[in-house]
Image (spheres, rainbow, N blue to C red):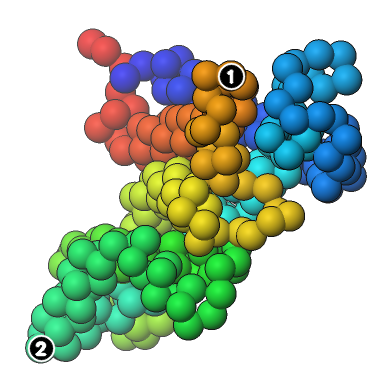
Amino acid sequence: MSARRRSRTLAVGCVLIAVIAATALLSLFWTPYDPADTSGGRLTPPGPLHPLGTDRLGRDLLTQLMLGARVALTAGTGAVVIGALLGLAGGLLAGFAAHWLDDVLAVLLDILIAFPTLLMAMLMVAAREASLLTAILAIGLAMSAVVARLTRVLVKQVLAQDYITASRTSGTSWPRIVTGHVLPNIWPTLSVNLALQMGLAVLAEASLSYLGLGAPPPNASWGRMLQEAQATVFTAPTGVIAPGVLLAMLVIGTNLIADGVRETADPTLRKGPR
């Protein structure tokens, strides 16, 4: 792929994410209406006072969408951080472990990966309560198994290289090998995976909120907005279209960034057409 197309892919992804991030940041300081304001009237169509209309409770949709952007980015970022930290630690442990321990950890990771995220969230909600933090923890734990398995494979590939043997022969300690050789070599591939996981985490949070397992009211979530608007999709379609479009923008943006990073990091893709 040419450098121009590669940079265009990355730029488009960054623009999409920047728009949503700017919206979320703006919601910290200003929103058109108070999130709890229901004075707009039920299902008011888009107009000068309410550019996107109101929902079935009379709340301004633009305000709810802005707050939903903040929830989506918080959930996605939080889940990725948890998944990255736990997954990286588990993958490094498995990569450096003895053969029998590596086999045990590999089986455990496969079991965790097969465990549905929604079911894990339901169990955590049963133990705690439905909240944004619970959703982030559930998604992050589910994601950590995927990251750990990938890290394990990458670490073993790096440890099999001749320069690792040379480093060990020269007396380099294992911590120095991890920080100087392993992490720099596995990070490009991991960063692509984490970018993809960001989009999946946002979708998972929206799904949990749709089922009532995410951030409870008065927090706004695009998933709950979709659930609340499904009964009025034909009479007030903006309530479904707007959060759906923003969800698609965020997921597409993270996927484009992941593609751009992958094409930049992979030397076989940096070459332009002959």
C-alpha span from label 1 to label 2 = 61 Å
Which x, y percent locates residue 106?
17, 75
Q: Is residue 207 left or right of residue 167?
A: right
Is residue 43 visible to us here?
yes
Q: In which quarter of the image is residue 24?
A: top right
How far across and how far down the image is residue 83, in percent? 44, 65
Instruction: Tell me what residue is drawn at x 25 percent, y 67 percent.
Output: 115
Element assignment for label 1: loop
What amino acid type is highlighted by mark number 1?
Thr
Say whether marks 1 and 2 touch (CB < 8 Å).
no
Q: What residue type is labelled 2?
A: Trp
Residue bearing mark 2:
100
Residue 130: assigned label? none
Coordinates of residue 80 in the picture (x, y in percent):
49, 58
Query: Residue at horizontal 42%, vertical 35%?
Result: 255
Label located before the other in sequence (1 or 2)? 2
218 vs 231: above or below: below
Total label count?
A: 2
For the point 62% across and 47% down, which residue is it?
221
Q: Can residue 141 be seen in this view?
A: no
The answer to which of 203 and 40 lies nearer the viewer is: 40
How many C-alpha atoms fall within 10 Å of the one at disc 1: few (<14), some, or many (≥20)? few
Task: Give the numbered dot on residue 235.
Answer: 1
195 is higher (above) or lower (below) than 14: below
Is residue 211 left or right of 104 when viewed as pictured?
A: right
Q: Where is residue 131 in the image (x, y as percent from the top left)?
A: 60, 66
